[in-house]
Amino acid sequence: MAVIGFIGLGNMGGPMAANLVKAGHQVVGYDLVPAAIDAAKAAGVTIGESPAAIAAAAEVVITMLPGGRHVLGVYGDIVPVSRPGTLLIDCSTIDVDSARKAHALAAEQGAASLDAPVSGGVGGASAGTLTFMAGGEADAFERARPILEAMGKKIVHCGGAGAGQAAKICNNMILGISMIGVCEAFVLAEKLGLSHQALFDVSSTSSGQCWSLTSYCPVPGPVPASPANRDYQPGFAAALMLKDLKLAQEAAQSAGAPTPLGAAAAQLYAMMNAQGEGGTDFSGIIRMLRGEG
């Protein structure tokens, strides 16, 4: 079993670190938030003095941080003290350019690295059923695979440096667009006098079928596990969806790719966040589309 450093023990990182402990690894973690530290301790994570101190002793260092500047800042601390051959895995969702810069920093020190953002939300992090989208060298991916498998059920090598982040933002652009489409259809159905269940029964088994409908239905009833049945408690918060859609738009502009629906989805989620609903599940955008709130 490996000695694993885990930097960022928040809503996602905390449960992921706990699953590594369950798998028998020695996990040394770090976070700035006392409540996150307390929860990690209760799950069997040892708390380190600093990211640099953790990296100096670890075989593998995993980061789960809010943005690209945070990742690059931490890499600036941990890469110089990492032992040759240390494996660095960044599971944050960040911009592709920052991911590639992190890979370059690791390479300068002789460390192997992956960008490996996740899909599956807090529920998937707790259950160990996340999907990992990995970018980096094939050797680094094979080293990381058994560690990622302790936290997820689907591990995909997407390509070279930054490819994991590219896959994540493309996937979440699809998700944001499709959720808005499903919500608009339910709002139209309500205006036309069609019940939620009737629309679900038809669309879930015909050409309108998609994950946003069948697994995450934005109205109460048809899918009991969806956040719509818990007053849209996240789940996946609207603020995080907006973050990912903005990353997708930055990438689209940099690559010269036309994404008109992605741009429209970003604008709508920006409106939802501006209304103070950033902490609401992203499927709660149906309430804004109804004109509520």
Image (cartoon, rainbow, N blue to C red):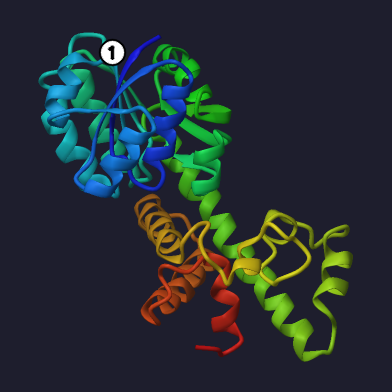
Vertical side of 237 occupied by 198: above or below: below
- Which residue is located at x 43 percent, y 18 percent? 144
Q: How many marks?
A: 1
Split into 4 quadrants, where in the image is the N terminus? top left
Note whether 186 is above or below 250 in the view shown. below
Q: Which residue is mark 1?
A: 59
Q: Quadrant of residue 47?
A: top left
Q: Is residue 246 above or below residue 268?
A: above
Tell me which corner region of the image, top left, top right, bottom left or bottom right, holds residue 27: top left
Closest to the observer: 258 or 286? 286
Q: What SS does tag 1 mark?
A: loop
Question: Local crowd at mark 1 within 10 Å, few (<14), some, or many (≥20)?
Answer: some
In terms of depth relative to the viewer, which is nearer, 283 or 72?
283
Q: For the view shown, which residue lies furthest in the front direction?
A: 42
Residue 206 pos. (x, y %): 87, 59
- The answer to which of 262 and 125 lies nearer the viewer is 125
Question: Which quadrant of the structure image shows residue 17?
Answer: top left
Q: Classify residue 177 as left or right of residue 109.
A: right
Q: Residue at x 36, y 12 (%)?
A: 2
Residue 171 in percent (x, y) is at: 55, 48
Residue 285 visible to the viewer: yes
Q: Which amino acid, mark 1? A: Glu
Can residue 79 be seen at all in this image of the molecule? no
120 or 100, which lies in front? 120
Locate residue 260, reporting x and y percent.
52, 67
Where residue 4 appears, x then y in whole percent? 32, 20
Q: Is residue 286 above or below residue 144?
A: below
